[in-house]
Image: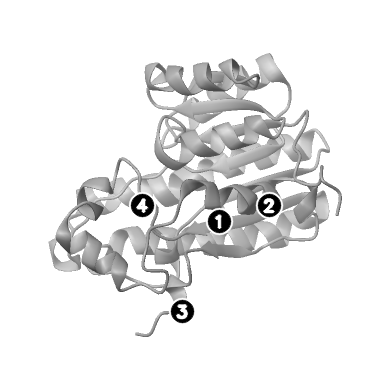
Amino acid sequence: MNKDLLSVQGKVALVTGASSGLGAHFSKVLAAAGAKVIVAARRVEKLASVVDEINASGGIATAVALDITDQKSVIEAMDKGEAEFGPISILINNAGVGDSKRFINVDEDSWDFVINTNLKGSWTVANQLSKRLIANKSSGSIINIASILGFRVSLGESTYAVSKAGVIQMTKAMALELGHKGIRVNALCPGYFKTEINEDYFNTEKGQTYIKSTPAKRLGRLEELDVPLLMLASDAGSFINGAALPVDGGHLVSPL
């Protein structure tokens, strides 16, 4: 096996939702593998520590303001990032939100907040980058960050699950239509990994009990997402298109 197969040396990657959690981690992984990374989030000041850490480690990164629910913001962020680093060929479509409520308690504002960010926002970013890749006659890899809740449901997460199921189906539709243009589109579907968003719950007795009921009996470690991410982003995944890859310690195959 070629040891450089997972390299993305010289590629330009855009990571949305990069100020913390999975997005910040993915940005560092891509930079360590050789990519110039455009880290994006609504508030640029929150990205400073990510950029500083990457640059201090010998990587290359820059920050741009990006609100994925605003098409103008998406276009401006891509324009700014490409002006500095050149054409984007890798997209980690990661930005997302949650609003945990039982279905009967979900109101229109809550529904719109989650769907407009997780599904419509992801579509907006992927749509705009796809157009650029086609205009430049360039190949590329788009990785939509979905979730195992795109396959199954959990109490109190109906809207989030619907949004991520939509992301998975969008991934397949994009792969079908863009594959012949040299653009691969896949979904990475993490199970439960501790981040700033969920750590309070997983530190409780209830959260610990839940995790012990899963096949792996533990949360995932962020580094366990590194190879799946790089496989989909790099030439190692050159014949993978339209896949929705769970990384969940077998959680999806647990008994109902």
> According to the image, label 1 marks what residue?
188
Do the residues under discs 3 and 1 have CB atoms within 8 angstroms? no
Pointers 4 and 1 in contact (C-beta within 8 Å) = no
Q: Which mark is residue 232?
A: 2
Between marks 3 and 4 in the image, the one whose residue lies nearer the viewer: 3
Instruction: Give x and y (percent) for residue 2.
Output: 86, 49
Q: Nearer the viewer, residue 126 or 234?
A: 234
* Residue 156 in view, yes or no: no
Q: Residue at x 36, y 72 (%)?
A: 214
* Label 3 crowd bin: few (<14), some (14–19), many (20+), radius 10 Å: few
Q: Amino acid at mark 1?
A: Leu
**Quarter of the image where one finds residue 83:** top right
| Label 4 to label 1: alpha-carbon separation | 18 Å
Disc 3 and disc 2: Cα gap in Å?
A: 23 Å
Asked whether, in this view, residue 26 is left or right of residue 2, the answer is: left
Distance of label 4 from label 2 (alpha carbons): 25 Å
Q: Which mark is first along the chain, 4 or 3?
A: 4
Name the residue tied to disc 4.
115
Q: Secondary structure at mark 2?
A: helix
Residue 8 position (above or below residue 61): below
Residue 255 can be seen, yes or no: yes
N-terminal of the pair, mark 2 or mark 1, is: 1
The quadrant of the rendering that contains the N terminus is bottom right
Dot 4 or dot 2: first in sequence order is: 4
